[in-house]
Amino acid sequence: MLILEYKLIVSELQATAIGEAIKVVQFIRNKAVRLWMDTHAKPYDLNRYCAVLAREYPFADLLNSQARQAAAERAAYAISRYLKPDKTGKRLKKPKFQKNNRSVEYKTTGWKLSEDRKRITFTDGLGIGKMKMLGTRDLCAYDLEKIKRVRIVRRADMFFVQFCLDINRSEVTEPTGKTVGLDMGLKSFYTDDVGNSVPCPQFLRKAEKGLKRAQRQLSKKQKGSQNRRKAGVKASRRHLKVQRQRKDFACKLARCVMMSNDIVALEDLQVKNLVKNRHLSKSIHDAAWSQFAQWLLYYGKVFGKPVVKVPPQYTSQDCSACGRRVKKALSERTHVCPCGLILDRDENGARNILRLALAILAVLNEILPAEGKDLGSAPTQGPAATAERTRRDVQFDETYPGAPENGEGSPSETPGEMAPLLPAQAG
Ligand SMILES: [Zn+2]
């Protein structure tokens, strides 16, 4: 799945019409959730319910019928993520009524591209009409049949349109003969196994002063006033900027790392748990490791190269030369081992990570012929288990970035079919 995004040039009237469409989508989604709460309706019932709503409410009838279906599918998706755990065993919270929907999604009808594919017209009853699209990617390069979904997304600064194409992106690169292990840190964004490091960009820290000011202005304004609304837009624009900077950084760096190496190893960090440490949480959020890791996985797929996540336990404690466990506090920056090895702490960690990853890949190569065997009897511990998990991830992960979950092109997990947009949080 490939997602192309363009800015939209909209008039005031069109902005109102899009706002109306977004409200209708939210209405249908919430009605569908209500129906499920009352009757435990199945996805099929929710889809049929769209037609009932369209008959009952004239404003719902104005929205394209497939867009109505897509709205009900959002509800169905939220419900299924609550009822069934995903492959990592996580379940989402019970669906709530949505208040801050920001997008409307069309399928293959209700919109039309102009001859040169630089303008798009929405043809349903809401009167959005024709809009100019700004972007660098040429849509003419793609088959129209490949466009499966079209979304209009509202962000603090403007409207965007996204095209979801049924194309698997893949690029062929020359083998580099290089492998790399990355140790994620707070001092530097990462350190690799030969001691190269990339400094943390600290976008949030840099923007903090302006952000705080905008937030202060916002809280001073009277609730419900026009001035409060304006201050709100200003504050969200600042947040959007940080979000975009982070994404840009993570995406470009990940691409660069994947281009210049054949195998990339990193820690399988549980950022959620780390963030619970209050003193470090801002730095950790700012470091945006998980976003970086997701982009690495994405580019790994694009280039057809393995990205191996290894368990993070003891990677910084163990000696990369002799394997001895050398306990050290978080503040100790140098690894000093009785065997004579003196090395930067992070570099030692990166070497361990790479060694572990190569061991996992070796096991992986051994068990690959046994493909198709019952996954239920797979080992649950040790390198073989990790290899098994990696094998499953490599083959069945349908992770791809590009579907902006929080509005700004951040990587997100999506099931086989196009997942509905989750309610946006920041911005
Ligand atoms: Zn040693």
Image (tube, helix red, strand yellow):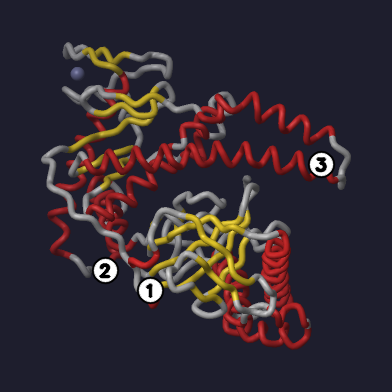
Q: Is mark 3 within 8 Å of ligand 1?
A: no
Residue wearing tag 3: 228
**Residue 185 versus residue 23: which sits nearer the camera?**
23
Would you place residue 345 above or below residue 86 in this image?
above
Could you say which disc has been placed on residue 374 in the image?
2
Disc 1 or 2, which lies upstream in sequence?
1
Mark 3 residue element: helix
Mark 1 residue element: helix
Going by the numbered disc 1, the residue's amino acid type is Lys
Which corner quadrant of the image does residue 142 belong to?
bottom left
Which corner quadrant of the image does residue 190 belong to?
top left
Left or right, residue 108 beside residue 395: right
Give the image location of residue 308, x and y in percent.
27, 45
Could you say which disc has been placed on residue 114 in the image?
none
Going by the numbered disc 3, the residue's amino acid type is Arg
Q: Is mark 2 within 8 Å of ligand 1?
A: no
Residue wearing tag 1: 146
Q: Nearer the viewer, mark 3 or mark 2?
A: 3
Measure the C-alpha gap from mark 3 to mark 1.
Answer: 43 Å
**Residue 142 versus residue 278: which sits nearer the camera?**
142
Disc 3 or 1, which lies upstream in sequence?
1
Disc 3 or 2, which lies upstream in sequence?
3
The quadrant of the image that shows the C terminus is top right
Q: Residues within 10 Å of mark 1 (few under 14, many from 20)?
A: some
Left or right, residue 206 beside residue 195: right
Give the image location of residue 330, x and y in percent.
42, 19
Measure the C-alpha gap from mark 3 to mark 2.
Answer: 59 Å
The quadrant of the image that shows the N terminus is bottom left
Would you place residue 242 above or below residue 124 in this image?
above
